[in-house]
Image: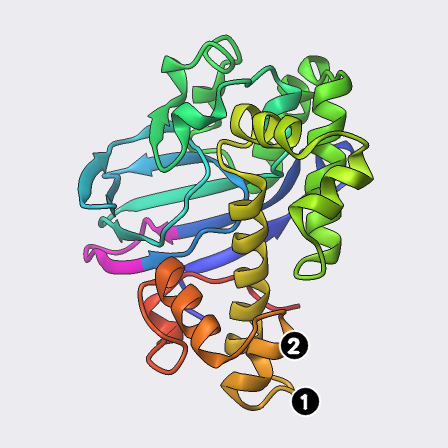
Amino acid sequence: MDPIYNEYYVTGILTNFVKKLWILDNLSSRSPILQKGVPPNGCFTMAIVQGNGLHIRHKDQARHLPEGIYFCGQITKTLSLDILSSTKAAMIQLFPWTPACFGVSDAHLFTDKICSASELTYFKELNLDIMIGLNNEMVCNHLVKIFSPSFTTNAKVQIITKSTQLILGKRSDITVASLAKSMKCSERHLQKLFKNFIGISPKLFINIIQLREALDDVVYPNDKLTTVIQVALSNGYYDQPHFNNTFASFIGTTPKNFKEKEFYLTIKK
């Protein structure tokens, strides 16, 4: 794993809406870190960027993110990231249901997009800029302070929360039909809720979570999963071509040609 990358897992009440922080620390370097891939993971992200900033390339679009706070919707393809010299970025990985609990009901507008948090009604009153330059513990303390009073739920949010938790738990062993049945609603209603609160369809969300599980098996193989076909079948893919095509559509390369050092990936505990 790249020494510039590390993870910080939250505790206490913050575990209700934040999965972890992943930190890209290039503050002490005069050289940029170029062209690292960040695959989709099914989560939303708030980014605290300090210093010279980041360069992002995603879906044929390029953008510079100067120092500030940003909100990233669901990512459906791997994005390419440059970390400029004297830059640190702390990525707050929000659970899929978290934005819904803070009133975000138009998540489809942010799919595959990165916005300044100050532009969004949901966050601009939360004094987020104070987090720039804080250490991980202080960031988490501020998140508890601003998130806890704003955390709300209703029947729609409960469906989103339970359904995404079910997908994360069962991963490849679930379909949209079985999910709707578990939620006691129609598939059409579930599709609408996912568009509004997650930003993508339940099928695409399932596919992303399934792919990330398979990606972990590629990066951290065990004694039982030593071949690509074994990884494919164990993660619910019909065959190796099905797995190869899905992997390439999300990651941008095949499992055979995948190079771990070219990506920022979850650290296996």
Can residue 194 be seen from the camera position used here? Answer: yes
- Observer-nearest residue: 71 or 74? 74
Q: Amino acid at mark 2?
A: Ser
Q: Seen in the image, is 26 located left or right of residue 124?
A: left
Can residue 16 be seen from the camera position used here? Answer: no
- Observer-nearest residue: 37 or 24? 37
Q: Mark 1 highlights which residue? A: 224
Do residues under tags 1 and 2 come within 8 Å of each other at their CB atoms? yes
Q: Seen in the image, is 75 located left or right of residue 219?
A: left
Q: Mark 1: which secondary structure? A: loop
Residue 246 drawn at (x, y percent): 43, 64
Name the quarter where the N terminus is drawn.
bottom left
Question: Would you call the spot at circle 2 few (<14 residues within 10 Å), some (14-19), or many (20 or more)?
Answer: some
Would you place residue 216 above or below residue 123 in this image? below
Q: Mark 2 highlights which residue? A: 234
Name the quarter where the C terminus is drawn.
bottom right
- Observer-nearest residue: 203 or 4? 203
Residue 201 drawn at (x, y percent): 53, 38
Task: Examine the structure image and report whether residue 28 is included in the region drawn in magenta.
Answer: yes
Residue 138 drawn at (x, y percent): 59, 33
Please provide the residue range marked out in magenta.
25-36
User: In 3D space, how far apart are the residues under numbered discs 1 and 2 (Cα atoms)?
Assistant: 10 Å
- Observer-nearest residue: 93 or 173? 173
Residue 140 drawn at (x, y percent): 62, 34
Residue sitting at x 66%, y 21%:
101
Q: Amino acid at mark 1?
A: Lys
